[in-house]
Image (cartoon, rainbow, N blue to C red):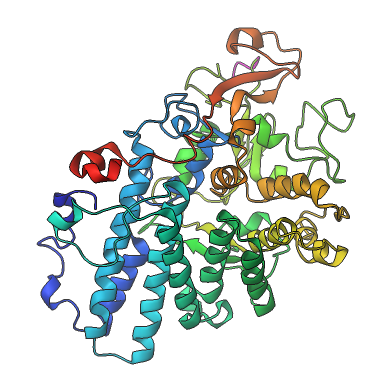
Amino acid sequence: MVSCDKELEQFPSNAFAADNFWTSESNANIALTGAYRGAIEYGTQVVPSDWWTYCGIVFMEFATDNAYDRRGDNSTQNRLTNGTLLPNNNVVNGYWKGSYKRIAICNDFLENIDEVAMEQAKIDRMSAEVQFLRATQYFYISQFWGSAPLVTTTLTPDEANNVDKASKSELVAFVENELKAAAAVLPSFGELKADEAGRASKQAAWAFLGRLYLGEKKFNEASQVYKQIIDEGDNIIDPDYQSLFTPTNEASSENIFSSQYFGGQAGNALPQHAYPAVASGWHIVNPLGSLADAYGFDDGTPLSYDDPRFDYSDMGANRDPRFRYNFIWDGSTFAGKTYDCHPDSTGSVDQLTYSKQATRTGYGLRKFFDESFSGNLRSDYGGNIPIIRYAEVLLSYLEAELEAGNPITQELLDLTINAVRGRASVGLPPITETDADLLRPILRNERRIELALEGQRLWDIFRWEIGDEVLVGDFWGAPFPNSTLYPTTSKKIDAQSRWYVTTKNFREGVDDVWPIPETEVNVNPKLGN
């Protein structure tokens, strides 16, 4: 699907030969591992090779109102939504190639696994896992491209270069059927053994099915499938939010499905990309002020710079604890070192350059990091990246019930949004709003701040059809009132004394449907129709 030479590289001379590979259970496990890995490449990436790399998940936020790429407006992630998206965008190309590479691996697996002499139950489970993996790729394709080729068998290079596009409805139907079939065979999350971390469960398949239904506005169906996960009873809201994203607690039953990393062998290089310069990182991930300001005070009230509880010298004071768990800000500490990004500080930075602290927004990323880590930032960190958390399931269940027009009761709120925001380490007061129109913005904001930087925001913007509201106009960073150097380091300053970061010009009906990569259309013009 990505070009003839790439297709032929699946069986290089230094690997297993295709004609004698499917001969043992151990080889089948190697093939299964390959399906899970897909197109994931280890090392420092800036362009995604797969939906589930740290780059594919976290850097997706650069295209939203949640974060900014320190490399500037010409970042191709930023170009996804700033009004300059073109078919030659290498981010779009990376996701496309990664999807069809994993699909090709899955097709090969499903065509050959029955040849292996092993227990039928093992064959059935492995097949269901690979069905799930293939279906997830078509889920992403259906949501971001809409119409695209639906390939379920191994193709010759000539066949691959002459495929037709399937309609979005055909892709959605395929994903629905495949996820249902996989879920019927997969073990439940609670049945996974300790050495099976990272493998798919019924809950993972149901969660992606729920996402599909939400994306297609089939809210009653979404509600039913999310309720299945809840009723299964295998997953929890972990009391410790911050540790969910570090190796110390990544095996929590809140994390239903995660990208797996192993320090020293399959390391997660996000620390190199996103640690602040004071901790030897490149500080690429800069949360935007619009996200930071979405975190209210610790009594649940919205943020206001005029409120005496807001402290310019300590922006984490009196805030929703998730603000402190997810971000670093001027004067806060990271890995035992002070993060200094005040525009007047000689130890700080001209925010229009890449020197010193190198922030472009006045905020940095804390989420995903164990600050006691002391190894090589590129290769030694083993922290997983969550793909599906139980918190998402609960918030999605409430959304499905709300949008389906079902009654909103206090019992439902306590089961869902209040369980998420009321976990011990967050401790926000319960939501009591039962009017759907008034609850909707509360729920959407809760989803945004709970799942911040986890790669969900752009899809949420697309399916809520709010791109022309939230991805248009100027975007700002942290506030620094009474700065003497600020006017020389920021192109402009807003009424809250926040420095200017960027401007977006999202095009509704254009930027919410990605173009098929130009390189693919050049090979097969039918993909451009």
Secondary structure, magenta segment, majority class: loop
* Quarter of the figure that contains the C terminus: top left
User: Residue drawn at (35%, 34%), measured in percent from left and top?
Assistant: 89
- Tell me where the magenta segment starts and ends, as one range: 344-348
Q: Position of residue 231 (x, y in %)?
A: 69, 77
Regarding residue 209, the answer to whether it shows in the image is: yes
Regarding residue 262, the answer to whether it shows in the image is: no
| Picture quadrant of residue 313 | top right
Q: Position of residue 246 (x, y in %)?
A: 57, 56
User: Residue drawn at (55%, 56%), measured in percent from left and top?
Assistant: 216
Q: Position of residue 18 (x, y in %)?
A: 14, 71
Question: Left or right of 200: which side holds 463?
Answer: right
User: Residue drawn at (37%, 39%), measured in percent from left and top?
Assistant: 515
Question: Left or right of 93: which side holds 356?
Answer: right
Q: Nearer the viewer, residue 404 or 444?
A: 404
Q: Nearer the viewer, residue 218 or 79?
A: 218
